[in-house]
């Protein structure tokens, strides 16, 4: 994400302390971002996160570190956005625990310049993370499709991959899309051992239509 994309963000802010919450809101709005919601309660922050889909979430450490950790956990569960913690002082124990729950960065106190710099860094890291996560996901789909083809056609891994690649080239579709189609069709078909002969033939015909190895 480049600097132009970080000029205007939709931000969720959560803190159990109302005074700190308002202080962070002032800083964020002063940086030119929009605060889409401000939350004190754990359950309410989960619902707001799911509904509003913010670009970024800022969680302040208030009276209870456990409360802040719960806020972070619920936001991470509900949102496809990074979370930054805003601390009043250094707290390595909290940071380590928050990192386990999906925290992407933190800043001590609310200095506007430092906050914007941390936002820029975190958004770049989050973008890289999403790209990496997507790469792992695509690889997992391809591996599963190869396993299905190996079992279906009694072939080895190399031959299964060649089937996927040749079909991809022939149809002009991305290899991962071909693999996903194989997996989807496989999931839709019941186990052949539970089918009557006529149903077995129909199931095999459907799978062949979705992926023709010839």
Image: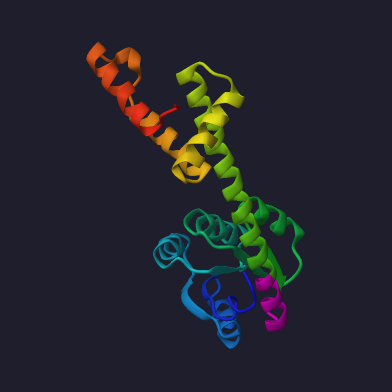
State the image coordinates of residue 83 (x, y, percent, origin top left): 59, 64
Residue 76: horizontal and vertical position, in percent? 54, 56
* Rendered location of residue 97, percent (x, y): 67, 53
Q: Is residue 209 magenta?
A: no
From what the image shows, is residue 99 above or below residue 57? above
Q: Quadrant of residue 131?
A: bottom right
Q: Is residue 109 visible?
A: no
Name the foreground residue: 158 vs 37: 158
Residue drawn at point x = 28 percent, y = 17 percent = 201
- Magenta residue check for 118: yes
Query: Which residue is at the front of the view, 23 or 153?
Result: 153
Q: On the picture, is 213 further left or further right than 113?
A: left
Front residue of 187/105: it is 187
Name the quadrant containing residue 93. bottom right
Q: Which residues are magenta?
A: 109-120
| Above or below 144: residue 27 | below
Quadrant in the picture for the C terminus: top left
* Camera sees residue 200: yes
Colour treatment of the image:
rainbow
**Where does the N terminus fall, quadrant-wise?**
bottom right
Taking the spot 67% from the left edge, 78% from the top edge, the residue there is: 116
Q: Position of residue 161 (x, y in %)?
A: 57, 31
Name the side, left or right, on which 32 lies relative to 191: right
Most frequent secondary structure within the magenta stretch: helix
């Amino acid at each position: 994400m480049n600097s132009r994309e970080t000029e205007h963000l939709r931000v969720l802010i959560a803190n159990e302390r109302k005074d700190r919450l308002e202080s962070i809101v002032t800083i964020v709005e002063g940086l030119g971002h929009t605060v889409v919601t401000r939350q004190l309660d754990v359950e309410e922050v989960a619902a707001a996160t799911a509904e509003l889909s913010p670009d970024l979430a800022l969680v302040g450490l208030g009276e209870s570190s456990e409360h802040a950790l719960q806020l972070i956990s619920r936001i991470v569960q509900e949102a496809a956005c990074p979370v930054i913690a805003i601390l009043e002082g250094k707290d390595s124990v909290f940071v380590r625990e928050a990192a386990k729950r999906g925290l992407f960065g933190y800043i001590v106190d609310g200095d506007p310049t430092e906050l914007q710099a941390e936002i820029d860094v975190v958004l770049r890291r989050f973008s890289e993370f999403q790209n990496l996560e997507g790469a792992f996901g695509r690889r997992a789909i391809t591996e599963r499709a190869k396993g299905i083809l190996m079992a279906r056609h009694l072939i080895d891994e190399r031959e299964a991959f060649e089937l996927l690649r040749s079909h991809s080239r022939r149809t002009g579709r991305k290899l991962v899309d071909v693999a996903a189609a194989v997996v989807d069709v496989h999931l839709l078909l019941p186990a052949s051992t539970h089918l009557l002969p006529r149903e077995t033939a129909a199931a095999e015909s459907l799978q062949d239509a979705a992926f023709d190895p010839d």
